[in-house]
Image (cartoon, rainbow, N blue to C red):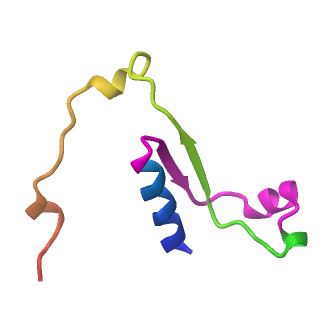
Amino acid sequence: MYLNLWELLLGVSTLGINATPMESIDTRALDAEFGLREKGYSSLFIVTLGYSDSDTDFNAKLPKSRLPFNEILTEV
């Protein structure tokens, strides 16, 4: 299931589309809203898709700060 999510996120990113996966959703409510259980499906997460607007998103133009690789990962 998460492999499929990864493929979706990777695919839309190559098209220049932003995506945000969300877990801890009310899957029963979502399944009921779209009639998923009756169709033999159930939801696991939601993915929002869209384009960012750098003109109105003040955060897009701010400098980003990243920790050094050796501080976040340990190579074994």
**Which residue is depicted at the point 53% across and 69% down?**
4
Which segment did they paint magenta? 14-36
Identify which residue, 9 or 32, lies in the foreground.
9
Vertically, is 36 above or below 18? below
Residue 21 percent coordinates (x, y): 53, 54
Q: Quadrant of residue 57?
A: top left
Q: Residue at x 49, y 33 (%)?
A: 51
Q: Is residue 64 above or below residue 54?
A: below
Query: Closest to the observer: 35 or 13?
Result: 13
Residue situated in front as seen by the camera: 56 or 16: 16
Residue farthest to the bottom? 76
Q: Residue at x 36, y 20 (%)?
A: 58
- The relative height of residue 10 versus residue 41 in the rendered view (above or below) is above
Quadrant of image for the N terminus: bottom right
Task: Tell which residue pokes out farthest to the top in this image.
Answer: 55
Looking at the image, which residue is at 42% across and 41% down? Answer: 16
Residue 30 lies left or right of residue 2; in this view the side is right
Image x and y of residue 14, in percent: 40, 49
Numbered marks: total = 0
Would residue 34 be counted in the magenta stretch? yes
Asked which quadrant contains residue 70, the reply is bottom left
Whether the magenta-drawn stretch holds residue 32 is answered as yes
Q: Quadrant of the C terminus?
A: bottom left
Residue 6 in the image: state x and y as whole percent. Answer: 46, 65
**Up-down relation of residue 65 to residue 47 (above or below):** above
